[in-house]
Structures are given as structure tokens and as C-alpha cells.
Image: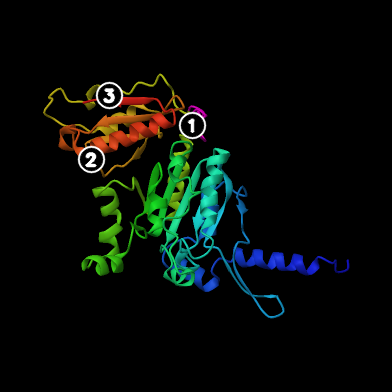
Amino acid sequence: MGRGEWHDDLEELEARRAIARALGGPEAVERQHARGKMDARQRIAALFDPGSFREMGMLAGHVSYGPDNRRETATPSTAIIGTGRIEGRPAVLAADDFTIRGGSSEAVVSEKWIYADRYAREMRLPLVRLIDSAGGSVKLLDKLGHTKIPGYALWPLTALLGEVPVVGVAMGACAGLGALRATAAHLTIMVRPTAQIFAGGPPVVKRALGADVSKEELGGWDAVHKRSGIAQLGARDDAEALALARRFLSYLPRNVWEMPPRSAPGDDPARAEAALDDLIPADSRKVYNPRAILKAVFDRGSVFEIGKETGGALITALARLDGWPVGVMINNPMVAAGALTRSAAVKMERFVDFCDTFHLPMVNLVD
């Protein structure tokens, strides 16, 4: 076949797609892997059912042209957005690409992840944010001569939480708006070895307060889970974090206009565990293991605990009864004798509100 009149344009289109697929280039991708982290496209492949991801806005980014109006350089956006399926059900994704300018939330087309949030709300689909961002760009402020804050008037950040499930996965640095995007969610998962969540990093704290703190002290697992409860689940690596996100969404409806999906029951609803006869001691001064009770009562393998190391006097979890998703609370006598401490009360309030939003029946085991 001869060259059609659109041949050059089609070649340029495919060249720009190839640039976007390559992220920040081979060297930047290798540095990402050397840190023990997946690159953004590997994360997307692990999150969604095979072959189901459909990208939006792949060509967005910054392009410079020469005197002949031909492309000289092209830098893709640091945001990758699109839709895919998780266990056959559709969901929306917004993923940061740290291999390009540290995944800066403002450097290249930040409107993409705002569009993903709006799309999730309008299409009534769950949203997963994969955050790996060094925050805003000082170079951008110099270029624009002003900040975008307060900006993003079309960003439906709070409205989303009342309508569709939102998961934030902190996979690396989550600074500035990255911290907000990771934690403005129904579930925040941290990859413990690589993630930190903070409004401003150690240099900002040093400049503002004169205090020397490390990234871990400022926004590591102990700071944002054990002390504040902002992050609810920790993972050993990227793959585990993405598996947790998939599992969490399996208990929930796609939106508040639907009911939670029932899974095919894999357990006998009439199962009676003999161990329950003795799990609670007759002596009320003796403690017992409440997690063993949950394991015995609910469908085998279905208990999904949330916020294990914060507000430890109360255990909160998702589980299934005869395949139906439910929210579960049980006092933990092994921590503060099961008394409702302040952190446990905050944990309870948040969990009850979450279950009410997504129509999950509550099972409350009280001691």
C-alpha cells in the first residue's frame, strides 16, 4: 500500500503513544525498580483484571516544537487515568508516575486526576488512586508567577465520599496534594517500606519550625497509622497493597444507589464451631482473643480487618455471612479491657458512617 495523506500524522500519533507507554524512560524506570517499587504501568496491570484497562488522555503532556513545527521533545503527564475491571466490575483509576519529575502533582497536566475524580462520580464507579508524588513543583510556580492554591474548583473531593467507594494507596512519597488525595478516601493503604504521608517534607518543617525530623518520623507508618489512624492498612510491598485494594472493593457496591454484592457462599451457613463454647472464659477477669471469635462466626476466610493497630480496644472489619457482606465490630478485652478509648471511639464513628453509606448491615459483638 502507498503512503496515505494521513501517514505522517498517524506515525506521529503512534510515536507519542510509545513515549507515554515508556513513562520516564528506561533509566528512570530502572531507578524506580531499584527502590523496590513497581512502575505505574506494572501497578495498573496488577490492580485490574488482565486486559481490561482502558487509558484516557494518554497523549496529554508537554511538547516542544522546532522551527519546522515538528516535535523536538515530549514529556508525558505524570498522571495516568482510565477505567478497568476488578473481579469483573468496573472501576476508575488515577495513578501517579514517579519516574517523571517525581510524580509532581502540578508539574504536568494535574487536571487529569481531577477529571478521573469527576468521571468516577458522574459514572457512579469506584475510584482507586495510586499515589507516588513528591508534591507541587516550585519550578511551576516560577513559570506561572502564582500558585494554583486555592484552585481546582471542579474537583469533587468531598462529594465523592458520599457516593462511590474511594481507595487511596500510598506507594511512595505522598506530599502536599498527594497526601490529601491518599487520605481523602474510605480506605488508605500504605506500602510500609516506601510510603510516607505529609503535607510538607522534612525540609519544609526545618525551614518553618527549625526542627530536624526524618521522613519516617514525619509521615511513616507509626505516625499516620498507630498515632493518627489516617492510614488504615499497611502492606509489605506494592503487590500486596494492590491485592488489598481489590479485596476491599469486593465487599462494596459500585455506588450508594446499589446494594453490596453477594459472593457465592463457600461455607455452610449452619456450621457450628465447638471452640466457641470455651473461647470466652467463665472468669470475667480473664481476657480472650476476639479475633478467634470472628474467625469462627463468619464465612471462612472472609474477615478483612481494618485499622488493626489504631484504636485497638475496638476491632473493626468487613466480613461475609452466607456470602453477604457485613460490617463487624467487637470489643477487644486485650487492649484497655475493651473500654472505648478516644481513638477507639473515633474509629467506631468512622466505621459506622462508612457502613451506613454503603448499606452494609452491622454485626456488633459487645463486651
Where disc 2 sits, the SS reads helix
Where disc 1 sits, the SS reads loop
Where disc 3 sits, the SS reads helix
Amino acid found under the numbered disc labelled 3: Leu
Amino acid found under the numbered disc labelled 1: Val
Badge 1: residue crowd in 10 Å (few <14, some 14–19, many ≥20): some
Disc 3 or 2, which lies upstream in sequence? 3
Front-most of residues 171 and 271? 171
Quarter-wise, where is residue 237 in the image?
Answer: bottom left
**Residue at point 51%, 53% (across, down):** 113
Front-most of residues 284 and 22? 22
**Left or right of 245 in this view: 292:** left
Badge 3: residue crowd in 10 Å (few <14, some 14–19, many ≥20): few
Q: CA distance from mark 3 to mark 2?
A: 29 Å
**Residue at point 22%, 68% (across, down):** 212
**Residue 276 has which mark?**
3
**Residue 343 has which mark?**
2
Mark 1, residue position? 256
For the record, the magenta segment spans 254-265
